[in-house]
Amino acid sequence: MLTKVEITNFKNFNDTFIFDLTQTKSFEFNKECVKNGIVNKAIIYGHNGVGKSNLGLALFDLVSHITDKKFIPEKYTNYLNADSTQNSAKFKFEFLFDGNQVVYEYSKKSSSVLLDELCTINGKVFAKIVKQDNKNIFLETDAVGTEGLKKDMTGNNISIIKYIKSNTILENNNTNSTFNNFVNFIENMLLFRNLDDRFYIGYEQGRHELANDIVEKGHLEDFESFLNDAGVSCKLSQEKIDGSFQLYFSFKEKKINFFEIASSGTTALTIFYFWYQRLKSEKKCSFLFIDEFDAFYHHSLSRLIVQRLTEVYATQVILTTHNTSVISNELLRPDCYFLMYKDRIRSLSNSTVKELREAHNIEKMYRAGSFEY
């Protein structure tokens, strides 16, 4: 699981911005929202422009150089902070896998240009880049199974993490298993966004046709039930045209192509359903970030989506929103709701001196300004 990230000189983050998921409390309700003392389900609030979307992009920057999964380079233009005089952005990620800590640090000139890397496991160096005379670049690693690797990386821009992953069969020991868990976690991270610039990063590769995917996987009836549960009363049908399945709303006298008349909210629900099925598949999604997850939803639907996501215990989930109706102890808990500002981010439980209880109406407290501490 991701436990902490530090971001410096990336987009709107000039000074070091720290997002710590380990500052949990001992609440006795909604325990599934915290896993091994780490926030497992989180919702982030913040005014427009504080950097909620950029936080998601920062978290998924490492997907670009460690994996071959979907990446959107154009989202990473204006990579460095415009006010900074530094020539690189710096990232530090901390993870915990079965009690083993992985710390991965690197700096970049742009999304595609790595400058240095360091990976430690349980406090010991697993792999790092060593520069000599500002010209020659070498990989330094004592990992068992990397003895035959070429260590001279001069002229290469490949990540040492990807290099080791792609060119070795590591011997089975605790350190190497932890490294593999770290790589698998990154390989199965997913970010998606439902607004007008709909896109996704990580987890898979390629472009998807939603209707064809739902029908081909045999999910048509389940999708119909999902929409009806969400308040979209409908009957669906399918038809195969030119080798691809099309989805239709079925009425008494005729049927109409699903996406011709689906509202923005229904389309957003369809995209959520598409990824939600993958969260429940054998190929587990390790980490999910949905930016503005409920931009087109009624507040009751927003609550339903949060409830569905809390049931997917294996996936660490972070959502951003402006919708205060989901600030409720019925859904999450105060250490899983975060208030984001340009220079910091804090959970509700760490934003007040008051002792919070399950019976508290934390939305009302938020609106009253009780969490500006």
Image (spheres, helix red, strand yellow):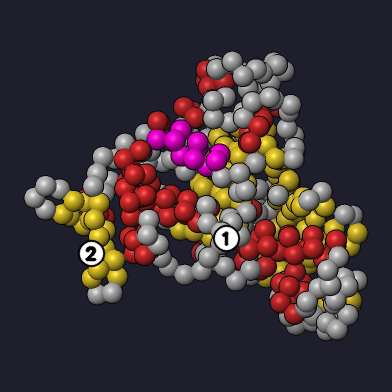
Please report the residue visible at 46 percent of the width from the left and 58 percent of the height from the top: 199
Q: Residue at x 57, y 20 (%)?
A: 362
Q: Position of residue 77 (x, y in %)?
A: 55, 62
Residue linked to disc 2: 239
Residue at position x 25%, y 68% in the image: 240
The amino acid type, in three-letter code, at marker 2 is: Glu
- Residue 39 figure quarter: top right
Residue 24: numbered disc? none
Q: Residue furthest left?
A: 253
The reply to whether the magenta stretch includes residue 307 is yes
Using the rendered image of the protein, determine whether residue 285 is visible from the camera's viewpoint. Answer: yes
- Residue bounds of the magenta highlight: 301-311
| Marks 1 and 2 in Cβ contact (< 8 Å) | no
Q: Is residue 68 above or below residue 41?
A: below
State left or right for residue 218 relative to residue 118. left
> Gap in Å between the C-alphas at discs 1 and 2?
28 Å
Is residue 124 shown left or right of residue 335?
right
Three-letter residue code for mark 1: Lys
Frontmost residue, 330 versus 2: 330
Crowding near pointer 2: few (<14 within 10 Å), some, many (20+)? some
Q: Position of residue 340 (x, y in %)?
A: 61, 36
Residue 335 vertical placement versus 308 (above, below): above
| Mark 1 nearby-residue class (10 Å; few <14, some 14–19, many ≥20) | few
User: Quick one: label 1 or label 2, which is nearer the N terminus?
Assistant: 2
Tell me the element at label 2. Answer: strand
Q: Pick the quarter of the image with the C terminus.
A: top right
Q: Determine which residue is flagged by label 1.
A: 283
Residue 371 in the image: x percent, y percent?
Answer: 63, 22
Q: Where residue 17 sits: x, y (%)?
A: 70, 44
